[in-house]
Image (tube, grey):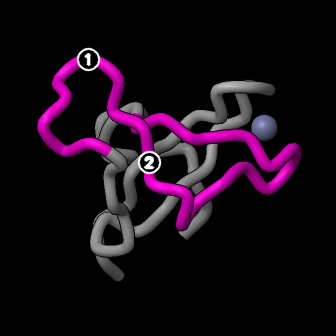
Amino acid sequence: MGEQMECMCQQCGVSIYIPADLISLEDPASTEAKLLSSLHVCEQCGGQLALVGRAGDEPHYRLA
Ligand SMILES: [Zn+2]
């Protein structure tokens, strides 16, 4: 299992976890808004996603 990154929908705020090696940023040079490219959109509303951080930065409450 690779590292997972937490992303948040800009429209509805839902959190989505995406494997780090699948992430591609719309503008990698930007340090402010780390928006994901349109390869990944919200599963709920189709909105654009923003990178929040590594999933491992949160307490581990996920099921193994
Ligand atoms: Zn959404």
Q: Is the magenta stretch mostly helix, strand or loop?
A: loop
The residue sitting at 36% across, 48% down in the picture is 26
Relative image position of residue 13 (x, y in whole percent): 71, 25
Tell me which image quadrant ligand 1 sits in.
Answer: top right
Look at mark 2 in the image and give the residue it sits on.
36
Q: What range is drawn magenta here?
A: 27-51
Please indicate whether residue 2 sits to the left or right of residue 60 in the image.
Answer: left
Q: How crowded is mark 1: few (under 14 residues within 10 Å), some or many (20 or more)?
A: few
Is the Cβ of the residue at disc 2 closer than 8 Å to that at disc 1? no
Residue extending furthest toward the right? 45
User: Relative to the observer, which residue lies in front, 26 or 42?
Assistant: 26
The residue sitting at 12% across, 37% down in the picture is 29
Look at mark 1 in the image and give the residue it sits on.
32
Q: Which amino acid does label 1 sit on?
A: Glu
Label 2, label 1: how far apart the Cα atoms are:
12 Å
Quadrant of the drawing holding the C terminus: bottom right
Quadrant for residue 27, please give it: top left
